[in-house]
Amino acid sequence: MPLFFELEVVYIVIGIFILIVTAIATTYPDDMSKGAFKKGMLGVGTVLTIMIVAHYFITTARMEGVKEIFNNGETIICENKMQRTISRSVLISKELGWRLEGHLFKSDDHVRDFHTSRCIEFDGIVPK
């Protein structure tokens, strides 16, 4: 459950905002029919719940795939949001001195860690 909140907290907050907007829009006295609040909240809440849960399962499946690829000695690529250049990605492999601790890739040669949820398999040519 902690991993769910770690990965989905942003989407949950956005969903709560959308539900607040839905509540305001469906309780407007002049334009909405009776029962609009109930229908709107159930409909929007259901769609948001399905989307957040689907995102969680897709993300965790990708994370497991990335871990497996890394443990097999292959290279993966991770998004680096701290570096504001054209190429904002970092190649990660055991050969390059990276290790996996929980859900984080860590290296003594790199300032920050990378979460497995921000990584994918690398299919390009690995520089030497």
Image (cartoon, rainbow, N blue to C red):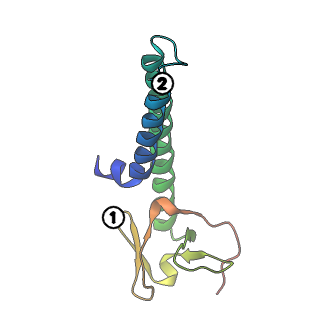
Q: Residue furthest top?
A: 34
* Amino acid at circle 1: Gly
Q: What's the distance in space between the residues labelled 1 and 2, CA to CA?
A: 48 Å
Relative height, residue 13 to residue 54 (above, below): below
Helix, strand, or loop for circle 1? Answer: loop
Residue highlighted by disc 1: 102
Label 1: how many Cα within 10 Å (few below 14, some 14–19, many 20+): few
Q: Position of residue 70 (x, y in %)?
A: 49, 67
At x 46%, y 62%, the residue is 116
**101 left or right, relative to 21:** left
Label 2: how many Cα within 10 Å (few below 14, some 14–19, many 20+): few
Locate residue 83: give its quadrant. Answer: bottom right
Q: Position of residue 92 (x, y in %)?
A: 53, 75
Q: Name the quadrant of the C terminus.
A: bottom right
Relative height, residue 111 to residue 49 (above, below): below
In depth, the one of 11 and 128 nearer the eye is 11
Nearer to us: label 1 or label 2: 2
* Amino acid at circle 2: Tyr
Helix, strand, or loop for circle 2? Answer: loop
In depth, the one of 115 and 20 nearer the eye is 20
At x 39%, y 68%, the residue is 104
Q: Position of residue 16 (x, y in %)?
A: 41, 40
In depth, the one of 125 and 48 nearer the eye is 48
Residue highlighted by disc 2: 28
